[in-house]
Amino acid sequence: MRGTIDNQIDTALGRSFAPDVALRTASPASLPAWFAVSDLAVASVGAAARELAGMLGLRDVGIDVRRTLIWFGMTLRPDGWAVPDAWDPIAGDYEAQDGWVKLHTNAPHHRDAALSVLGCAAERDAVGEAVRGWRKSDLEDAVVAAGGAAAAMHSLSEWAEHPQGIAVSKEPVIAWRTKSSGVAPKDLDGLRVLDLTRVLAGPVATRFLAGFGASVLRIDPPGWSEPGLEPEVTLGKKLAGLDLRRSDDRTTFEGLLGQADVLVHGYRPGALAGLGYDGDRLRALAPDMIEVALDAYGWSGPWAGRRGFDSLVQMSSGIADAGMARSGAERPVPLPVQALDHATGYLMAAAALRALRILRDRGDVVSARLSLARTAQLLVSAGPTDPLEDMAPIEDGDLVSEATGWGPARRVRFPVVIGGRQPRWPHPARPLRTDPAGW
């Protein structure tokens, strides 16, 4: 099954330009899942590692499989403090009149949108009672229309026949576009990466790049926070804040764009243009900049502009329903980790590195688009699996000490070694908007 996923990733990156790299895996392990999550994890991390080795002119990549799977979850073990729960208390699965629906309420405005539609108190029992009065797709549509995030559960076959499922099936794993040519090549060390991403795939991509030499600057708007994830996804980055509704902050942002080598963002189709930065404007500000873009539900079809997260895409695409059916459970059974986010993040890193190699070797500036829904299809295409036993627990030898912005901690060692080189993150994990907006 990993061969199926590997082949599709190789095709997406372009076999004709594949780096000559030997990939070695060690410490066999598997996550307990009804899909080939472990294969997807190793294949996506391996893709990013191979592209990095190709960029550096190295030929040997080693991957610790067990640690790879741990890095698809939470890697930090705090010492004397605690990471907040990543999930809002009312987020989760609820039974409607005709099936299940997931409400994603981690962001306050998404929470407010769901509650405004349901017209109930912010209590789990009250939300459950209100949801039972709705048909699942009607509630999904109403919450999305109100500016929230929700997903009705579909089966694999229902998604295959859904207009959005059909649209996603026709999209490549990575969609490429040549933007310009004839610019000077760039090296990875000191590469300027402007990170406009949030939960979770984009931050995974830029964390990988930051660990191997790129200078990553993450920009967040006022008020945005990810308290349960910031200790994981801010590692290695400078962290600034800008309000693009303010003219002086827009001027600062445009100056940063003009100096960036790579832009990584997770805006839905049309959202960046709505802020005044459509394709023409971006090219005018930064004509030689590589762009790697992510959205949830794909770049075509009726849901191309729909907000989404890993857990919602799992509901929509049939993954949670298949897990429920195969396990004989009475509730949706998602993947044991946010595998769509993490795998797409490493594929985004691989795409950025491939774009850099194309720039260096051919002089062409290319951009790449990926989506969580297309990664879900990549996973499903490998077929079902039988869950295996849980992995061996984390041991002291897996951990290294780290001073974070919240206190001391230990983090699981990164699973990739490239030509004897391990990542070196220049900044510890810290809260968002800690730094000034500059390189």
Image (tube, rainbow, N blue to C red):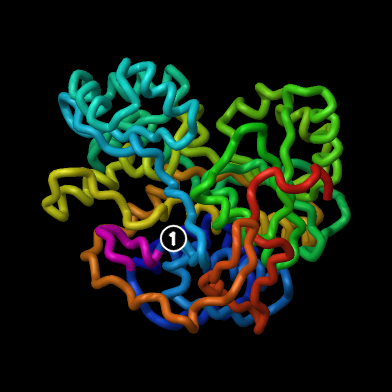
On the picture, is 359 further left or further right than 326?
right
For image coordinates 80% across by 30% down, the residue present is 249
On the picture, is 425 further left or further right than 145?
right
The stretch in magenta equals: 31-39
For image coordinates 42% across by 21% down, the residue present is 113
In which image quadrant can residue 370 be found?
top right
Determine whether 75 is above or below 249 in the image.
below
Q: Where is residue 80 drawn, in percent x and y?
A: 51, 64
In which image quadrant can residue 54 be found?
bottom right
For image coordinates 45% across by 35% down, the residue present is 308
Residue that sits furthest to the front in the current view? 80
Specify whether residue 92 is painted magenta: no
Specify whether residue 32 is painted magenta: yes
Main SS of the magenta part reads loop
- Disc 1 element: loop
Determine whether 10 is above or below 316 in the image.
below
Q: Where is residue 146 drawn, in percent x and y?
A: 43, 18
Residue closer to the observer: 102 or 61: 102
For image coordinates 63% across by 76% down, the residue present is 20
Residue closer to the observer: 322 or 378: 322
Residue type at tag 1: Gly
Q: Where is residue 302 drawn, in percent x and y?
A: 43, 25
Residue receiving disc 1: 73
